[in-house]
Amino acid sequence: MKAIKKLSLIFLSLLVFTACNDEDLNVDNNAGVSQTGGLLDVKNISLNYVVGNQGPYSATVRVFQGDVKSTSVRVAKTFYTTKTEMVDGEEVKTTLVSNTVDNFKTIDIADTAQNSQFTYSFTFPELIEGLSVEGTPLSSNDGDFIIGDYWELQYYTTTSNGLETLNYSTTQAAVSTRFAGTYTTLKGEYFRLGANNGGGAMWTGEKMVIKSIDAVTYQWAEWGIVSGWSGNVLYFQIDPTTSAITYPAEWDGVAQILNDQPLTTYPADASNLTNVIGFTSDPNVATIVANGKDQLDMVYGYLTTGSGPREFYHLLEKIVN
């Protein structure tokens, strides 16, 4: 695929609404929304376009209706990628942007109930249609795209007073591999210095975002954030043949750590993971499930010098929309 020239984005002066996640929002009691209208809650802010699966994919948007009604939603699309160049012997990456197709989808809103929603779908041929780089259309072969490339879908709401507003939230459909996505924790264990601090429910029910880095490498972004442990990223790799999960000793030239301590993995550091290994019969493996609810069975930890091991076991299941 030819590199996309970096474009300057010109933002129109539009009234922007922040998406709301309050399931009990009463629009008629919200004076600002009631008068203005156009408020949306984008349920799928992140989707994974899996190479080899051209769709259809779907996204759901919730509509908050007030005195001023939302009558239609226009979806625009733009494609983003990166160009890598060697400059003075160093690798430099630049974010590049395609043209924008303003009328990718238009959805008429007939439901005037306070809390309604709509779902629309799209395929790979639809995503690439009309988008070009240097006058050349995007490749029709999804294998030509790079892990991390993405389409951004923006939502413009037309209301009964004739105004059009741009919603704050967007949907990003990122080029990824099978196991990328949003997961929920089915099982979780945490042992600190041999004591069970997880109680069988370490992060259970919490959502975790797993991102593709390349064809085999994944990133568990914001690992531990639900426990107040900030600044952590866990990189792991899934063998495409055996589905075994391994944890590289370092990523991008930096040693892997959790909570500023050296990462421990099974079986290399089995002596520091004795309390959690018994919770699974098949540690560190990814399982493809027919309904898309793939699972990641993970055993790992970290070792605090002068203190002792922290051990984790997690069974993650992909959320299917």
Image (cartoon, helix red, strand yellow):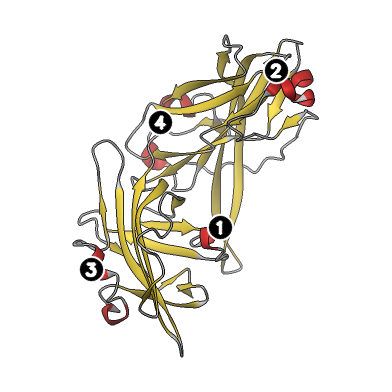
Disc 3: which residue: 278
Cα distance between the residues tagged 1 and 3? 47 Å
Residue 316: give x, y in percent of width and height.
35, 52
Q: Which of 317 and 263 is in front in this view?
A: 317
State which tag comes first along the sequence, 4 or 1.
1
Cα distance between the residues tagged 4 and 1? 24 Å
Mark 1 neighbour density, 10 Å: few (under 14) some (14–19) many (20 or more): few
Mark 3 neighbour density, 10 Å: few (under 14) some (14–19) many (20 or more): few
Disc 1: which residue: 85
Please report contact status of discs 1 and 3: CB closer than 8 Å, yes or no: no
Work out whether 146 lies above or below 93: above
- In this picture, residue 294 sits left or right of residue 33: left
Work out whether 83 lies above or below 19: below
Of tags 1 and 2, which is closer to the observer? 2
Q: In which quarter of the image is residue 91?
A: bottom right
State which tag comes first along the sequence, 3 or 2.
2
Q: Which of 247 and 42 is in front in this view?
A: 42
Disc assigned to residue 140: 4
Disc 2: which residue: 66
Cα distance between the residues tagged 1 and 2? 51 Å
Name the kind of residue labelled 2 in the image.
Answer: Gly
Work out whether 246 lies above or below 316: below
Work out which residue is located at the far bottom of the displayed protein and give it: 306
- Seen at 44% across and 55% down, the residue is 213
Mark 4 neighbour density, 10 Å: few (under 14) some (14–19) many (20 or more): few
Is any part of residue 38 visible from this angle?
no
Q: Which of 261 and 144 is in front in this view?
A: 261
Residue 107: give x, y in percent of width and height.
56, 15
- In this picture, residue 31 sits left or right of residue 54: right
- In this picture, residue 33 sits left or right of residue 278: right
Disc assigned to residue 313: none
State which tag comes first along the sequence, 1 or 2.
2
